Amino acid sequence: MAQGTVQVTHTGTSRWRRRTGEYPSLAAALEAAGDGDVLTVAPGTYRENLIVQRAVTLRGPEGSPGSVRIAPVDGVPLTVRASATVQDLHVEGQDSAAPALLVEEGAPELVDVRVVTRSASGIEVRGGARPTVRRCTVDNPGGIGIAVLDGGGGVFEECEVVAAGQAGVAVRGGAHPRLERCRVHHASGAGLSATGEHSGLEAVGCEIYEIKGSGVQITGRATAHLTNCDVHRTTSDGITLDTDAVLTLADCHIHDIPENAVDLRSRSVLTLTRSTVRQFGRNGLSVWDPGTRVDANQCEIHDSTGDYPAVWVSDGATAVLDACRVHDVPDALFVLDRGSRVDVVDSDLSQVRNTAVSVSDGATAQLDDCRIREAATGAWFRDHGSGGTLANCTVDAIQTGVIVTKGADPTIERCTVTSPAEAGFYVSAGGRGTFQGCRVTGSEGYGFHVIDGCRTTLKKCRTERCARGGYEFSEDGPLVEECTSDESGGIRPGASAAPQPAVQTQSATQTVGLLSQVPDQRAEAPAEEEPPARTSQAVLGELDTLVGLESVKREVRALTDMIEVGRRRQEAGLKAASVRRHLVFTGSPGTGKTTVARLYGEILASLGVLDKGHLVEVSRVDLVGEHIGSTAIRTQEAFQRAHGGVLFIDEAYALSPEDSGRDFGREAIDTLVKLMEDQRDAVVVIVAGYTAEMERFLSVNPGVASRFSRTITFSDYVPEELLRIVEQQTDEHEYRLGTGTSEALLKYFTALPKGPAFGNGRTARQTFESMVEQHAGRVAQLGEPSTDDLTLLYPEDLPELP
């Protein structure tokens, strides 16, 4: 028979003919059609469960996209079991236990199909099916967007998952699809997920964003290849690999991630080429467990938004960085635990606020031909068993070039340290190390400073223009061979072996004791302090503009008055009452505790109580380590970052869990108590959290409560205050509240549940953001909106009550 056209209508008299003609239902037309036939479906809603079992073309009318709706009450709306073509249909499913569009066999083509459903999955591909899916859209807030299962495959081109209640794209059971130029967003699970042996996926030119889980999740021996893909704006990690997963990233961009940009565990392997990782809240690369490995080539990791190392390698994992750049981060590279190793070749580590390379707990680092600049510490080998090699590296514009402590034993060869503020190389506390052919130029302190009788070996090293001297050793100090300096005194006495005569090009102008510590250049030559940007009264004025918090404002003003009067009494030669400045903030989330802490620090700086008044915000994860001894180090480092300002510990009660067991939180509390006493004039500590939990926290350690002067309680916002916050947001963003909107907001906030999830001011701001989003969807439909249309928010823009 010749190919015919099957027209389907809902109404009117049907003419029953074999194949060519009009049929009263889609099922009847599909039954009559043969391979090669074209079924053109008239506009309408079809409450049928369709099964396509022949190589036909099933399409909607031309020029009327979305006019044909396949929407049965339950079951699978559309099942494809042949190499058919399905085009320009709108598929709707309601069965939470079934997919909306199921492809079971053949190599069909799905073109311009829109799936709007609340099903188990929007599009599901099974078994030997290999569809080609082009320009299709899936909106499924009830389940998975696209599921490829049980050996299925196929190609998805320019498709979009606009919402998913679980994963955006899920691959398992040995399936292996390819995604080209697809977009996956607003998924409540992972954006892309592949799990299980022989499962895998390929993605080229895809974008994954606005994901409530991980952007990409590969687990259980699955593999994936991503090329020229963009992963951003997730609420969890950007990319997660676990349990023998294998992932290759080429020319990809991972950014705007609140947690780890990439997290690998349990023997997973990641290869990155020409990819960038930026704006991450925790680690850029987080690598854990024996057998886990990262190979990065020509990659860039930068612009951290948190206080964590950019690259974290621990528990026996391995990382290789070749021709990479790491910059604008708190710490560049931390490698810890015996068996962990990092190899860095021809790479740049710059603009690092703390330590560029930290090696501890028996780990190893190998750096060749690398450049480290603008860091507090270039490389720090921290403890016994930690070591490795730095070869042909340059370290510039730092506080201290290389630190070796507590029995660490690295080899440093042919490295140059230029213009350190404190020392080129510093060894203490039983550190060892071999330094061969190294050079220090322009140090504001010493070139080589070795204390505590450390048995370090120096061979053929040289120092030039070091302000305090080229070499400073303690008694019974290092072994020295053929080392030179441009100072007349050469190497100071106390070295175990006499060096070659130093080259004399200038005279020594000062003498320093043999047991001197590394000098603090800031203490010796303090920079002229800039006046505070605002007076205390100006900052208090900003405090007064905050909505509500009347009791908080009174407490802060009382403290400020006490400190100000005490300062004036001292200036008059009178005794001033001692005021403990550490505070406890109690209350629910979103009540302004962090904002008030920031303003309090600025007030103390304006009064001369603190040097800078900056705010360093930390929580349990920043203070409590995974290993014995690491907690004290983390807590001390947090105090150091807060020096001259305020250390704000949110949810401080988490440091003393009710079922603590072997928890290290108690060590953090003990360290805090000691540091608060030792540095009481340099750091102000504010602990914050829920009221009942903070009472328990203060009772854990007898010294804790005595360190705080007072407790300030932040009350929940009442509906009228929440309305004022929305009004402030409206003014700030150039919107206006239309007639009746204020009243509707007040009713909304009154009816809003005030349970544990209630966010106070945060909830008010989120309500405003939801209104703006709803307003945008409404105004976008207008041809030429007026200024009122663009600015007025109405009651219908309010979100639904949860």
Image (tube, rainbow, N blue to C red):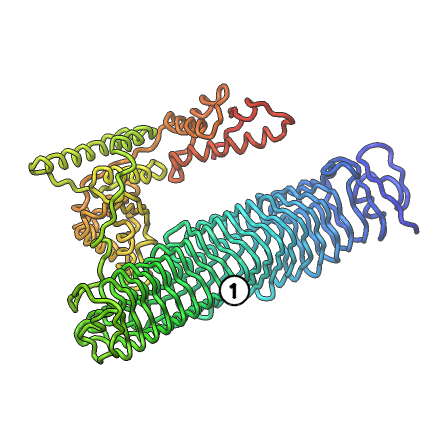
Q: Position of residue 601 (x, y in %)?
A: 27, 40
Q: Secondary structure at mark 1?
A: strand
Q: Position of residue 359 (x, y in %)?
A: 35, 67
The foreground one among 668 and 691 is 668
For the point 48% across and 32% down, which residue is it? Answer: 801
Q: Is residue 286 left or right of residue 380?
A: right
Q: Is residue 720 above or below residue 445?
A: above
The foreground one among 197 and 309 is 309
User: For residue 6, which quarter of the picture?
Assistant: top right
User: For residue 329, which quarter of the picture?
Assistant: bottom left
On the image, numbered disc 1 is attached to which residue?
A: 297
Q: Callout 1: 10 Å neighbours few (<14), some, many (20+)?
A: many
Q: Position of residue 343 (x, y in %)?
A: 44, 69
In the rendered image, is residue 504 in sight? yes
For the point 39% across and 62% down, which residue is it? Answer: 372
Q: Is residue 161 above or below residue 128?
A: above
For this orientation, the residue located farthest to the front is 505
For the point 30% across and 65% down, which residue is it? Answer: 424
Q: Position of residue 380 (x, y in %)?
A: 32, 65
For this orientation, the residue located farthest to the right is 1
In the rendered image, is residue 686 in sight? no
Q: Inspect the image, locate mark 1, and give the three-letter code of the amino acid beneath it.
A: Asn
The foreground one among 461 and 261 is 461
Q: Is residue 402 left or right of residue 328?
A: left
Q: Is residue 188 left or right of residue 756?
A: right
Q: Is residue 546 above or below residue 137?
A: above
Q: Is residue 458 above or below residue 321?
A: below
For this orientation, the residue located farthest to the top is 739
Q: Is residue 377 left or right of residue 520?
A: right
